[in-house]
Structure formats: C-alpha cells, structure tokens
Amino acid sequence: MNAPEAPDDRAAALARVWAAMRALVLEDDRRKEVADALGMSFSRAKALRRLLPGPLTMRELTAWLGTDRPYTTLVVDDLESRGYVRRTVHPGDRRHRIVTLTEAGRAAAERADRILARPPDALAALSADDLAALDRVMAAVGSAGAAQDVMSLPEKRAQAIEPNSAM
C-alpha cells in the first residue's frame, strides 16, 4: 500500500505538472503558425474558426470572441475584404447582420483547424504505453473540469446573447 502523499509533495507535483503542460502548449506556438499560414492575425483566424459550424450574428460573434462591437466590426470588415466572409441582413430582424463563411473562408478556417489539431512532436514521440496513460489522465482531468461546468453550450450561448439587442 502506498504511503499518503504529504501536502508539500502534492503541491510540488502539481507545480511540476502544470509547468510542463504550460511549456508544452506555449513553446509549440500554433497560434503564430496559424497566423503565418493564413497571413492574418490569430484573432481573425479565430473568428473564421468560430464560423465553421454555421453563420452567426455580429452580436453572437462578438460574444464568442470576447471582444467589443467596434473591434468585431473591424475584424469582419477585414475578413470580408479578403473574401472570407459575407455579411447579410438578418431575415427576421433587419437591425441585425449575419456573418457567413465563403468557400475561401471555410478553406482558411479548416486549414487553421488542421494546424491547431496537429499534436506536438513531444506527444507524438511518447511510447504507446505512456500515451495511453496520458490519455487516461487527461480524460480524468477533463471529467473533473466538466463536473464543475454543468451549463450546456446552448445555455451559455443564450446567456451571452441578448436577443433584443441590435448589432
């Protein structure tokens, strides 16, 4: 039977694991790779990726990006000038604008997704056993995080969007 872990040992292990995870993510800078590949800032690529599931109103896009309305307008203006998005009037409320990906925008967003989805070399180099162990650990970490965040995505989206606000 294993001896109970001392609080100092646990704190040190948590610090080591978190430092290693941060270094893995931050040193393998996929955001810069996406920006370079698409020839635009990562925030613009992020907006494209947010539109992959389907069109959004300007207000919804603003909420998803966590930006303010003027900045979202600048981003959409730039993406529209590049031929990546189309802005149209909402059929149910002419005060709202809907942003939709063009074929070129969909291709750029999918390219960004492929870059971001590619595992870092350090993970690819793990043995099958180590990868399986890490997979189990990350599933446990994800489950613990999900248990703390019980609000569904549609509920979050509805909470973030005020239905009667014009944009």
Image (spheres, grey):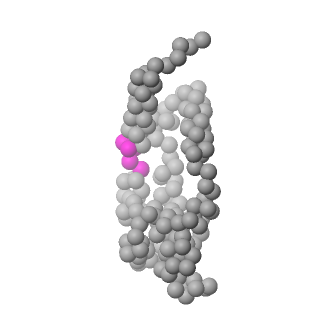
The answer to which of 57 and 149 lies nearer the viewer is: 149
Say whether residue 29 is visible: yes
Q: In this view, does 55 lie above or below 37?
A: below
Q: What stretch is highlighted in magenta?
A: 26-30
Q: In this view, does 152 lie above or below 47?
A: above
The answer to which of 35 and 55 lies nearer the viewer is: 55
Q: What residue is at 44 percent from the left and 63 percent from the top? A: 66
Query: For the stretch drawn in magenta, what is the main secondary structure?
Result: helix
Q: x and y percent of residue 82 in the render?
A: 42, 74
Can you name the residue that lies furthest to the top here? Answer: 1
Q: What residue is at 37 percent from the left and 64 percent from the top? A: 40
Q: What residue is at 49 percent from the left and 19 percent from the top? A: 5
Say whether residue 106 is visible: no
Q: What residue is at 41 percent from the left and 74 percent from the top? A: 69
Q: x and y percent of residue 92 in the render?
A: 62, 85
Q: x and y percent of residue 51 in the render?
A: 54, 67
Q: Does the magenta stretch include residue 38?
A: no
- When asked about the image quadrant of residue 162, the answer is bottom right
Q: Is residue 78 above or below residue 116?
A: below
